[in-house]
Amino acid sequence: MREEVVVPATIKGAIKINETWRFHVGDDPSWADPNFDDSAWDKVDLTQNFAEQGIESYTGYAWYRLRLRPAPVPDSGVLSLALLVVPNSVGQLQVIANGVEVGRTQGMRDRPAMYQSPPFTVAISHAAADGTVVLAVRSWAGQSFGHGPLRRVELGNPESVGERFSLERDSYWDKHVLAEMILSALFFGVTVLGFTLYLAQRNHMEYLWLALLCLSVTIRACVETAFGLALLSLSTFQILNPWATWIFIAVTLEFVLHFTGNHWRRTVRGMQIAALLLPVTAMLHLEDTFKYLSLASQFLFCGLIVVMLFRSWRRGRPESGVMLLPFFLAATADSSNILLDFAANRGWLPQRFASHQFYFGSIQYSISTVTYLVFLGSLIAVILYRFVDVSQDEQRSAAEIEAARSVQALLIPTQLPSNRNFMLESAYLPANGVGGDFFQVLPLKDDSMLIVVGDVSGKGLQAAMNASTLVGALRNELSHEPATVLAHLNQVMLGATSGAVAGFATCLCARIYPNGKMIVANAGHLSPYRDGREMELAACLPLGIIPNVEYEQSTFQLKHGDRLTFVSDGVVEATDAKGELFGFERTQQVSHEPARYIAQIAQRFGQTDDITVVSLYFVPA
C-alpha cells in the first residue's frame, strides 16, 4: 500500500509536509503520472541534508513525489487547497498535481537556467476520483547542493497559505534584496554628491573619481539586487559581478591616487590593467586560475591603498589619516572573510569557518556590506572636510586676487594720453587674472612722452604686487632720463624682493620728444620694433639682480609716420598645441599691426604668459 499524507478536513493555518517524500535522480516524463509506482524511490526529509540521508550530491534533474489524501469536506465536498513552495537558492522547480502542471520557477524551461528562486504558491484543484492528489516536483540543479533544490513545502487553505506566502516573501526580501538595495541607494546618493562637488570645483579631479567610485559600487549592488529578484540568471550574474568588482578596484585606485597626490602612477596603472584583464581568465573557463589570481590581487589592492594613504598622511595630509583607519579595518575584515570563504570552499577548513550572515532586525547582511558602509562613511567625512577646506582657501585666494586686480587696475592705464605729435594704443592680457607685466605712458611738460614697459618674473598675485610697486615708484620718479629711471627702479626692485622669494624684472624706458628724438635704456627687455624691424639696443641686466647698475642709453631719430611697437615676452613665447613657439619671426611680421590685433593673435596661438603690447605712431605737427 502506498504511503499517503492525510489532510484534515479543517486546517488551521498551514501544515508543513516535509517528510514522506520520495526522491529519485534523473528525468522521465512518465514520473508525472499519478499512477506511477514510486515505492522503490528513496525516502527524503526536506529539512535534512542529502548527506545525512545517505544521498549523494548530483547535478541535473531529479524528481520528488508525494501522495495527499484530503479528508471529505462537509456539505460542498469540493477540494480547496494551496501549496507554499520554497525552493533552495538557484534550484529550479516544476510542480505537477495529478499530471497537470500548476506552477514553476523562472529558470525551469526547455533549456533550464539557474535563477535565484523566490517562494511561490500553487492552487490544487485537480483531485482524482477518489479525492487523492499526487504531487510530483520536477527539479533541476546546475550545481550540486548539499540540501536539494526543494527546501520546504506547506499546505493549507488559500487564505492561510496566502498569509504564509506574504511572510515568506518578506523574509526572502530581507535576506536577498533589502541590504543591497539600501547599499545601492546610499552609494548613489554619494555619487550625486561627488558630481556636485566636482561641478563646484572642476580643478579637483578626486571629486569626479569619488563619484565614479560610488557609481561602480551602486552598479555592483544593483547587479546583486537584480539577481536576488530573479531578474538575472546565475550565469549572467557571474559575468557581470566580477567586472563590477574589478571596475570598482580600478576606479578606487584612481580616486586614491588623486586624493593623496601620490606619484605611483605606473604602479597604479599596472594594477588597474591587471584588474580589468583578470575577469577574462574566468571567461576562458580558467576558474581555478581566476580564483587564485582574484584572491591575490584583492590583497595587493588593499595593501596598495593602505600604503598610499599612510604615505600621504605622513607627508602632512590629515584627511588621509582619517580615511586610513576605516579603510584598513574594512579591508582587513573583508579580506579575512574572502580568505576564510576560499579555504572553506576548498575543504581546507571546516564549513563553519565560512562567512556568516548577520541580521539587523529582520534584514540579513554580510561582512562585505559592513565594510562598504564603513568605507562610505569615511569617504563622506573626508571629502566634505576637504571640500570645505578647499572652498575656504579658494575664497581667501579669490579675495587676495581681487584686491590685487583692483590695485593693478589703478596703476595700469586703460586710456592712453595723446597729443598732436603722438598717437598711442595698448593691449594688456594677463594670463591668470592678474599678471606681472606693466606699462606706463607719462606725458611730460615739454610735450615729450615717457614710455615704460616691463615684465616681472613669475605669475599671479606676487608678480602683480611687484609690478604695482614698480609702477608706483615710477609715478613718483622725479628724473625722466631713461637710464636714471631704470637705476631707480632697480633699487626699488631689490627692496621689494628682499626677505621674500628672489625675483627680477625686465624693463624698457624710452623718452620721445616732439621733434622725433628718442632716448632708450633697456634692462633685459625685448627691443621695440620700428616699422616692422627690431631696433638694436645695448643689453643690460634686468632690474633686481644686483645693486648700482649703470644702464646705457641709445639715441634714435624718428621720421614722420614711424610706428614703434613695444611687446612683452608673452607674445614671443605663445605656444600652440604642438609645442611650437610664436617666435620672433612671427612677432616681427605682425609688429606693424594695431596693438590689440597683435595681442589677440598671440593669445589665439596659445597664451602661456602675460601679454602686453604698446604702439606709438609718430605724426609731428
Image: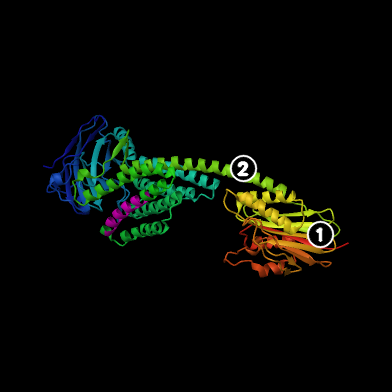
Q: Compare residues 185 and 499 and report the one nearer the observer.
A: 499
Q: Quadrant of the C terminus?
A: bottom right
Q: Which residue is mark 2?
A: 399
Please identify the residue farthest to the front as the structure is shown. Answer: 548
Q: Residue at x 83, y 68 (%)?
A: 559
Q: Residues within 10 Å of mark 2 (few under 14, many from 20)?
A: few
Q: Around disc 1, counting alpha carbons within 10 Å, would you say few (fewer than 14), some (14 to 19), or many (20 or more)?
A: some
| In front of the other: 523 or 124 | 523
Q: Position of residue 262 (x, y in %)?
A: 43, 53
In the rendered view, tell whether residue 561 sits above or below residue 222.
Answer: below
The answer to whether the residues at label 2 and label 1 have Cβ atoms under 8 Å apart is: no
Q: In front: 201, or 138?
A: 201
Please, what secondary structure does the residue beneath circle 2 have? helix
Amino acid at the residue labelled 1: Met
- In the image: residue 449, left or right of residue 268: right
Query: Which element carries disc 1, helix, strand or loop?
Result: strand
Q: Is residue 547 visible?
A: yes
Kind of residue indicated by mark 2: Ala
Residue 421 in the figure: left or right of residue 74: right
Tell me which segment is drawn in magenta: 289-305
Residue denoted by label 1: 423
x%, y% of residue 106? Answer: 33, 49
